[in-house]
Image (cartoon, helix red, strand yellow):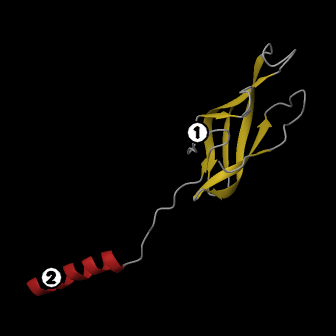
């Protein structure tokens, strides 16, 4: 009996070492305007140059290797008469991240789209594409 247990123990040890590796795959992240990428960020800066648009995430409804979707509130400066004197307004929207690419050895979403719950005065904004930082 003892011999059977030793053989079974050895077999388990060999299978643990020589068995198929189940490597963890790092999740796709998003950097956007920021230098450091993150997984499911709570806030997303939309206007990289001046900070006049951002998105506050209420919840992420999807985050896969191909795309991610969040619902929340877009905060956008109307820049009237100029951005320094403009007023921020908020709108319910969905934020969609797409186009994963390898950036510095890690997978990152490189395209962002906003879809507003109600049609804004100026229409839907064009998708924004981010370069690897």
Circles 2, 1 touching at the beta carbon (< 8 Å): no
In the picture, residue 86 is in which quadrant? Answer: top right
- Residue at 15 percent of width and 82 percent of height: 6
Q: Which residue is mark 1?
A: 41
Q: Secondary structure at mark 1?
A: loop
Residue 44 picture quarter: top right
Return the disc, 2 or 1, that comes first in the chain's sequence: 2
Horizontal relation, residue 114 to residue 34: left or right? right
- Residue 20 position, x and y percent, is 41, 76
Q: Position of residue 107 (x, y in %)?
A: 61, 56
Q: Disc 2 and disc 1: Cα gap in Å?
A: 50 Å
Q: Out of 67 and 52, give the one closest to the viewer.
A: 52
The numbered dot on residue 67 is: none
Residue at the image position 20 percent from the left and 78 percent from the top: 9
Q: Quadrant of residue 79?
A: top right
Q: Quadrant of the N terminus?
A: bottom left
Q: Nearer the viewer, mark 2 or mark 1?
A: 1
Q: Which residue is mark 2?
A: 6
Regarding residue 74, the answer to whether it shows in the image is no
90 or 128: nearer the eye?
A: 128
Location of residue 95 with respect to 74 vertically, above or below: below
Badge 1 density bin: few <14, some 14–19, many ≥20, Cα 10 Å: some
| Camera sees residue 129 | yes
> Which residue is farthest left?
2
The crowding category of the residue bearing disc 2, from other C-alpha atoms within 10 Å (few below 14, some 14 to 19, many at least 20), is few
Asked which secondary structure carries label 2, the reply is: helix
- Image: 36 above or below 13: above
x%, y% of residue 34?
A: 63, 39
């Amino acid at each position: 009996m003892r011999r059977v247990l030793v053989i079974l123990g050895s077999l388990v040890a060999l299978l643990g070492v020589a068995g198929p590796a189940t490597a963890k795959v790092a999740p796709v992240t998003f950097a956007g305007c920021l230098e450091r990428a993150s997984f499911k960020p709570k806030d997303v800066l939309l206007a990289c140059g001046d900070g006049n648009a951002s998105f506050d995430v209420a919840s992420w409804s999807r985050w896969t290797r191909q795309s991610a979707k969040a619902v929340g509130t877009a905060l956008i400066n109307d820049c009237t008469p100029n951005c320094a004197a403009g007023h921020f307004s908020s709108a319910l929207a969905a934020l969609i991240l797409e186009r994963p690419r390898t950036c510095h050895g890690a997978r990152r979403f490189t395209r962002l789209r906003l879809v507003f719950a109600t049609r804004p005065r100026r229409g839907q904004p064009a998708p924004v594409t981010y370069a690897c930082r």
